[in-house]
Image (cartoon, rainbow, N blue to C red):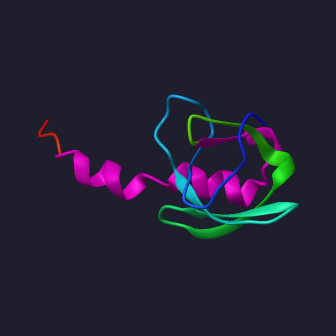
Amino acid sequence: MAESVRVDQPVFLHDGEVAFGAVREVHKHELRIYIENAGEFTVPTSAVHEVHFDKVILDGRKLDEKLRAAIGRAHAAEDDEDHEPVDE
């Protein structure tokens, strides 16, 4: 890791995407991450792919299914609000 993980840093799966959450706690072997629309999750530090430019990027291959599903729903409410129904 280029930088250290710190509380309140945004969390991503890929650089350049929208953050899905933020770091809440940092421990030696794990992080507590708040994921939008899902709550807090524990993530092993081994799942941190990179830390740079004040961003934490996780390796999705090292995350369990429940966490990946929560990440997938992180912006679901925003997506519903951003789109007006289309009349056909």
Q: Quadrant of the N terminus?
A: top right
User: For the point 36% across and 58% down, which residue is it?
Assistant: 77
Percent of width and height locating residue 80: 30, 53
Q: Is residue 11 magenta?
A: no
Residue lying at 22% horizontally and 45% vertically, measured from the top left: 83
Instruction: Indicate whether residue 71 is drawn in magenta.
Output: yes
* Residue 33, image quadrant: bottom right
Residue 78 on image: x %, y %: 33, 53
Residue that lies at the very extreme toward the top in this rendered image: 16
Is residue 60 or residue 12 the one in the foreground? 12
| Most foreground residue, 26 or 35 | 26
User: Looking at the image, how many numbered discs can be counted on the residues?
Assistant: 0
Quarter occupied by the C terminus: top left
Q: Residue furthest bottom?
A: 39
Which of the 4 quarters of the picture holds residue 58?
top right
Residue at 88% from the left image edge and 60% from the top image edge: 29
Give the residue furthest to the left: 87
Q: Position of residue 21 (x, y in %)?
A: 53, 55
Q: Residue at x 81, y 62 (%)?
A: 30
Report x, y in % for residue 25.
68, 68
Q: Nearer the viewer, residue 3 or 75?
A: 3
Q: Is residue 65 left or right of residue 14?
A: right
Give the magenta part as a residue range.
55-84
Q: With 88 as the anchor, is 52 left or right in this view? A: right
